């Protein structure tokens, strides 16, 4: 890593930390005014934002970026409107209570849990410019300053979003615009630099391809930086022998509306007793989405994540299984643990599936595409955390981005 890259990241972190108190002490009203102003500016400066994004897309296409990655990079008119709508919903969402009474203590005292901002939170993500707004808005709502680092393909779009949407909206609400910093470097080394600053950025949200994200999480752990990592994805659907054919067709099609996302259908496990009968229905649904099935014998791990394969992302792994026990074992042991669903009309089987699956999200006759902060919780997410330890798991939103502080004070206060 060059000193120049490391210094650029550290300078962003220092600016964010210096500005952080402005956000930590801001009123609820000021924060929501800032978020609403961001939504308004997205619409008002729509042409500028789309032009900057078009330049990113044109350059990426000329450099040979795959169709799936180009889809992630593109801000359409509808997506921009959706970004603004999400900001308005976030502005209207309730703020976290800053303190919660826990219990009465002896001696006329009481215990209170205080919820404090982390301070400065980092975020590393790839070529998805909408994530710049998602993460920045979540940090603002949670009163945390941020240092954002995006992939080189989306940097032009991200810079315009910060310059003409985020920063002016914060300033107009009386909040130091320096609380949200965007690393202005294209080098990949900037991501590693971000997880090496425990005294400035104690927590970093990691989103991206599995190997890169896991490597950054390891580097962060070595440097004393905590991470919330979204490294792997891929939804699983188990088709039970009591599944309804029309329901299966709808789930398969509805789970493949976008291919370059983590919560799409990735692995389809079909009970062997109904495999032959339902295959025509499944095949037709896949064909309707332009998706090719990868059938046994597989030359890849059964949980291979197609969304990360730019050459073959329009693929779903299909395999027959002997029943629920085998399906759950595969989902638990050979996939990321992001999400798994069951298609069945038998409630007892569905409950058994729910009890046995250990992953982050579990679904009954519903698509795994629903595992998303906005779709489930009505607010944008910073990412989806798959950790199997206590702490925020699943879609991480502003309500998760705080540290607890226990305070003991007179019961009369």
Image (cartoon, grey):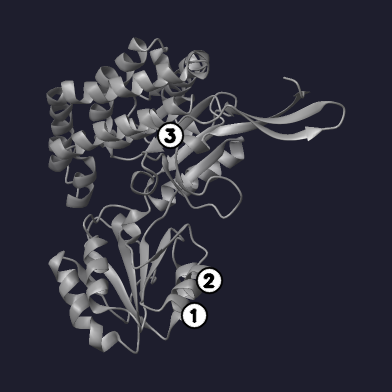
Image location of residue 274, percent across then percent down: 30, 87
Q: Which residue is mark 3?
A: 123
Q: Give the residue drawn at x 60%, y 25%.
A: 199
Image location of residue 250, percent across then percent down: 23, 68
Q: Which residue is mark 2?
A: 356
Task: Give the answer, above or below, for where 202 lies relative to 218.
Answer: above
Count of numbered circles on the image = 3
Of badges 3 and 2, nearer the viewer stands: 2
**Is residue 256 shown left or right of residue 35?**
left
Gap between marks 2 and 1, in whole Å?
Answer: 8 Å
Marks 3 and 2 close (CB-CB < 8 Å): no
- Tell me which label, 3 or 2, sits earlier in the chain: 3
Dot 2: what SS? helix
State which quarter of the image contains the C terminus: top right
Find residue 336 and report its image quarter.
Answer: bottom left
Q: Which residue is mark 1?
A: 325
Q: Give the residue drawn at x 30%, y 52%.
A: 261
Residue 2 visible, this angle: no
Residue 391 visible, this angle: yes
Task: Give the answer, above or below, for where 281 lies relative to 142.
Answer: below
- Tell me which label, 1 or 3, sits earlier in the chain: 3
Dot 1: what SS? helix
Label 2 Cα neighbours within 10 Å, binned few <14 / some 14-19 / many ≥20:
some
């Amino acid at each position: 890593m060059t000193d120049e890259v490391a210094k650029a990241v550290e300078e962003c972190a220092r600016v964010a930390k210096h500005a952080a108190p402005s956000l930590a002490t801001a009123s609820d009203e000021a924060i929501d005014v800032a978020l609403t102003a961001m939504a308004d500016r997205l619409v008002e400066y729509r042409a500028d934002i789309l032009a900057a994004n078009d330049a990113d897309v044109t350059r990426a296409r000329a450099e040979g970026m795959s169709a799936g990655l180009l889809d992630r990079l593109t801000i359409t008119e509808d997506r921009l409107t959706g970004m603004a709508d999400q900001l308005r919903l976030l502005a209207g969402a309730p703020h976290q209570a800053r303190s919660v009474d826990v219990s009465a203590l002896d001696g006329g005292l009481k215990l209170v849990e205080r919820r404090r901002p982390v301070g400065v939170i980092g975020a590393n993500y790839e070529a998805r410019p909408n994530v710049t707004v998602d993460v920045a808005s979540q940090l603002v709502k949670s009163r945390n300053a941020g240092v954002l680092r995006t992939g080189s393909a989306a940097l032009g779009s991200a810079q315009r979003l910060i310059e003409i949407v985020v920063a002016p909206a914060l300033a107009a609400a009386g909040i130091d615009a320096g609380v949200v910093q965007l690393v202005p470097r294209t080098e990949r080394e900037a991501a590693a630099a971000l997880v090496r600053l425990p005294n400035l950025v104690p927590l970093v949200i990691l989103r991206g391809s599995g190997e890169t994200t896991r490597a950054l999480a390891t580097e962060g752990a070595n440097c004393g930086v905590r991470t919330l990592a979204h490294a792997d994805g891929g939804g699983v659907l188990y088709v039970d022998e009591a599944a309804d054919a029309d329901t299966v067709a709808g789930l398969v099609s509805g789970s493949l509306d976008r291919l370059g996302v983590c919560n799409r259908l990735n692995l389809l496990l079909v009970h062997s007793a109904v495999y032959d009968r339902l295959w025509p229905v499944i095949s037709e649904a896949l064909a309707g989405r332009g998706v090719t099935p990868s059938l046994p014998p597989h030359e890849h791990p059964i949980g291979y994540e197609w969304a990360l394969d730019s050459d073959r992302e329009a693929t779903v792994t299909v395999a027959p299984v002997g029943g629920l026990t085998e399906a759950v074992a595969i989902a638990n042991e050979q996939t990321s643990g992001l999400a798994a669903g069951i298609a069945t009309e038998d409630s007892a089987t569905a409950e058994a599936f729910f009890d046995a699956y250990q992953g982050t999200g579990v679904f009954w006759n519903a698509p795994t595409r629903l595992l998303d902060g906005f779709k489930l919780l009505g607010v944008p997410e910073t990412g989806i955390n798959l950790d199997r330890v206590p702490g925020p798991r699943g879609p991480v939103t502003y309500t998760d981005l705080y540290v607890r502080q226990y305070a003991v004070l007179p019961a009369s206060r």
